Image (cartoon, helix red, strand yellow):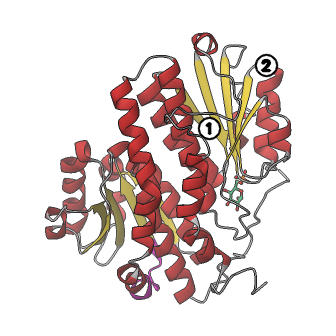
Amino acid sequence: ESAEKEGYQHFMIKEINEQPKGVSETLMRRLDKEDNIVLDGIKLTKEDLEHINKIYIVACGTAYHAGLVGRYAIEKLARIPVEVDVASEFRYRDPFVDENTLFIAVSQSGETLDTLAALREAKRKGARILSIVNVVGSSVARESHDVFYTWAGPEIAVASTKAYTTQLIAMYLIALHMAKTADSISNEEYKKVIQELKTLPEKVKGILGDIDKIQHLGDAQFSNESVFFMGRGLDVNVAHEGSLKLKEISYINSFAIAAGELKHGTIALIEKGTLVMALATQDHLYDKMLSNIQEVRARGAYVVAVAKEGNKEVEKTADVVLYIPNTMDELTPVLSIIPLQLFAYFIAVARGCDVDKPKNLAKSVTVE
Ligand code: G6P
């Protein structure tokens, strides 16, 4: 096992560090020389898209969080309505599915029972099934009409990291491909997004090469008993994933909220020293987010902000700022999740937790 870890202390940190490669492979294998997206033979013609009037993205755990970003990307770029649901809910709520529905299943293992059952239910009702899967030949892959494989490589640690970032890339590529096919994006805009996607592996590498601040923060915060994550827009989706990482491996009671919901409940729990992880990467929502940070600070919270490089202003309000390299608002999740994965990892190590095999959790849940 130690040979497989290639010198890393845990699989999780090894896999976190494999993200530049996973992101790059998942992306570059789908681009031809002219930067056209080649979706592994997945047929989504203009005519097909005209028939699709609804998309469901269904998954569990981390894959569900990737689906939340997927909804944003597809709705924004391809202008098709998308609903995202956790598989265990979807399968029992008699959803509106018919021949005009595209059902997108997201699963690292391709063996999660609830996801598979939801897929079968949608297929029975006539939906077209596209899956985003990491394990080649898995059950979800076999039962889908089309499969988009993520190129994360085997993921061993229970807490999913590289599967998530590669699922995000899959979502962006599918959304962009749909947008281009449906003519809902200009050539110029398309090229701009592709160019920006190509810069992400290096940017992820940049974050991974400068981890002292995050490690220090992880060591300093390890005895916190509850942590709140908040954000707006795409940031709230990343907040959910960051919070899941922390609770999975460190057993800290953490949860994530849309920052606009603070005053509808959660602010009652903020007191002196409460740790709040505030994501503030979305330019168009920045002012609103800043006032949410001020609200929790005024009640004594210790705020760690995640912001884009160059944003010096946030330093005046937050206690600590973790910077991510600049990118388009739409693509920030691929970068902003990295400091949160590392933060969860360092806290769990400092607390002496079994990082790769957290108690009560399994890598793949094949029972209901
Ligand atoms: C388990 C794992 C999670 C994972 C979820 C969905 O709970 O511990 O890391 O996100 O299952 O798994 P899947 O293989 O379908 O992505």
**Ligand 1's quadrant:** bottom right
SS class, disc 1: strand
Tell which residue pokes out farthest to the front in this image.
33
Looking at the image, is 311 positioned above or below residue 214? above
Q: Which residue is mark 1?
A: 85
Q: Is residue 2 above or below residue 342?
A: below
Badge 1: residue crowd in 10 Å (few <14, some 14–19, many ≥20): some
Q: Which residues are magenta?
A: 218-226
Which amino acid is tagged 2?
Lys
* Residue 233 visible at all: no
Q: Quadrant of the N terminus?
A: bottom right
* Residue 94 x %, y %: 72, 25
Q: Which residue is mark 2?
A: 125
Judge whether residue 325 is colored magenta. Answer: no
Q: Residue at x 84, y 54 (%)?
A: 366
The residue nearer to you, when weighing 368 against 53, is: 53
